[in-house]
Amino acid sequence: MVTYIIRRLLYGIPVIVVSSFLIFVFVSTTTDPLETAKMNPRGSKTAINLVIKEKHLDKPTIERYGYWVRDVFTNGGGTTILTDRPIFPDIRRVLGNTLQLVIAAELLTLLLAVAVGVYSAIRQYSAFDYSATTLSFLGLAIPTFWLGLILQIIFINIFLKWHVRIFYTASLSSVDPGHGFQFFLDRVQHLVLPVITLAIVGIAGYSRFMRASMLEVINADYVRTARAKGLVERRVILRHAFRNALIPLMTLAAIDFGTFFGGAVITETIFGLDGMGLFFINSLNNGETYSLMAWLLITATMVVVFNLIADIVLGFLDPRIRLD
Amino acid sequence: MTDSERPSDHPKKGLTDVRLEGGIYPPDAQPRTDPGVPTEFVTGMPASELVYESGLDLKARSQWAYARRRFLRHRLAMGSVFGLILILLAGVLANRLTSYGPAEIDFNNILQKPTTKGHHYFGADFLGRDYLTRVLFAIRTSAKVAFLVAFLSTALGTAVGALAGYFGGWIDNLLMRFTDLVLTLPAIAVLLVASARFGNGNQYRVAVIISLLLWTGIARVVRGVFLSLREKEYVEAAKAAGAGDMRIIFRHILPNSLGPIIVNMTLTTAGAILIEAALSFLGFGIKPPTPALGQLIQDGATELQTAWWLVVFPGIVIMAIVLCINFIGDGLRDALDPTQRVRA
């Protein structure tokens, strides 16, 4: 088991190295973080040259990649190019914000998707099943960014018309969020719309997945055996079918969770949430290679780690699978 | 049995219209006396007109004919085909359907609400450009990108998957490790960075970039199919008859793996529409003056509080296209791969 984990983690290293190098080359050769500074007529040439020298911008890309790797191990990912701001505190802040968003969204998604999927499977071809199917097809066809904008339009117009503030449509907190419960309420009001945006698309996909795996289990021989020996239907479904049908979804959720650390790029951009996704977009737009690389390092590592966690969990839950 | 002996007065009966208590045979049916030799070899009659002694007229249908029948009977899928054709035709005929140009500025019409007056059914944007016209032209761009992505990624994925699955060994190992690598790359990061770097806001470049990320799914599917089909007896027979690798791949295995490939291609098209829209929305995809659906929404989002129609209409069109394609894909899967039906 331990060797398995170690081997898997070692396999992850080349993936991280290759993707980080590719992104580093792409970003550092196309965007110039000093573009606006150079255009400023009153900007001093010496200051710009100093930045270039200090950040090794005049060195070949490979060498700069080396400097970045050194910074990762000794300097917490280094500092931004233009403003010389340490990257690590920023990334810790946006990661915390993103986790609030995606954990809330994922919990909501899982709860509803499991309920809908199981009920659809038990009552296959019922009115409920058909409407759930139709709705999930609709959910899978909705562009995320469009859904977010529509929610914004609705709640902005509610506010403009009746002056009722139900949910905020942008940012993470009010200017003066207050303390304790007041702060919590304020945060919830800000997070509801982005969470709904993420959850609707997620529920559409997960509920289909749950339905399919539940259907497969319900038609399995051991479920028929359970019924044949006279168990109550409720017990057959909950203890025998449901617990096993949950395994594939748990694996999928664990893998997905790894990708969540990168933030919901689109949703965070629309709602102006100070999370990983927005951090990524801003770094890309400003040509801040090192910020972008810090983002990438966290994201790629988490994807590798959670893929591994998914496999380990699967190995524990499903005795037919042996890890070695 | 020769042609002249064929009972001319016998009504042609397919299996489906025989409904008798005794079974599926008509009353005058006789057991075949000479089983085993196809009529083709005895009489030179093509197998498709095979007539058994029973008088049952059995028409040989290829599996494609069966698939076509199943698809044509899939009501939702056929409806979606019509819907999609309608939307695409509207895009293709954009310059005939409206009297406005996609970039025709009209300062008397700035942020016009949707109205029948002057046929501004979708309203007008902040430069007074007729929004229906812009949406129709955007359909062109988005559909072009989506189909290009579907074609390119399917071709690439099929090639990689076929080579890996057919030859196995180190070729398989090499190609699949590469596929895994592409699959584990953080997709959105690579997509955005590559679009910013190479995309240039050009629709064809954006399409190529999206394809270079989307082929992995198809490659895995095709590899799986090839792995199982290359062990089949007919492949062995072809080998024994002296067929070369390329002939076996293209003539024997590929036609039999077209089902999953086509289904995946449809799903890729739907995915490509959504990805292109998201890219253009974030400002990394197709850039003005070429109108694309995602980019229209991005433009409209600046007037979010006052002009809802600028966001609503292009989004509904995207949804309609994706919905149609997904339903078609569902119908195709039912038609081409009946074993998968339960999982729908």
Image: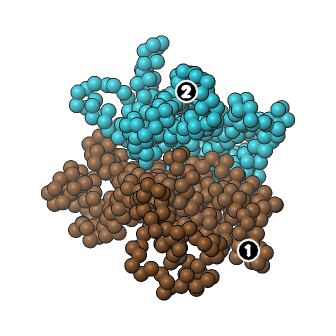
Chain colours: A cyan, B brown
**Residue B120 in sight from this viewpoint:** yes
Q: Is residue A5 left or right of residue B122?
A: right
Question: For the point 45% across and 79% down, which residue is it?
Answer: B7
Left or right of B228: which side holds A3? right
User: Is residue B300 shown above or below A187?
Assistant: below
Q: Residue furthest right?
A: A3
Residues tagged by mark 1 and mark 2 found on one chain of the structure: no
Residue lying furthest top = A180
What separation in Å lies between label 1 and label 2 (alpha carbons)? 49 Å
- Chain under label 1? B
Q: Nearer the viewer, residue B112 or B49?
A: B49
Place of residue A168 in the rendered image (x, y in percent of width and height, measured from the top left)? 38, 29
Identify which residue is drawn at 52% across, 50% down.
B341
Q: Which secondary structure, mark 2?
A: helix
Q: Which residue is mark 2?
A: A237
Placement of the C terminus of chain A among the 4 image quadrants: top right
* Subunit that carries the residue with mark 2: A
Q: Toward the viewer: A53 or B51?
A: B51
Residue A126 lies, in percent from the top left, at 40, 37
Q: Amino acid at mark 2?
A: Ile
Please tell me which residue lies in front, B8 or B186.
Answer: B8
Per the image, the residue denoted by label 1 is B238
Amino acid at the residue labelled 1: Ala
Q: Residue at horizontal 85%, vertical 35%?
A: A3
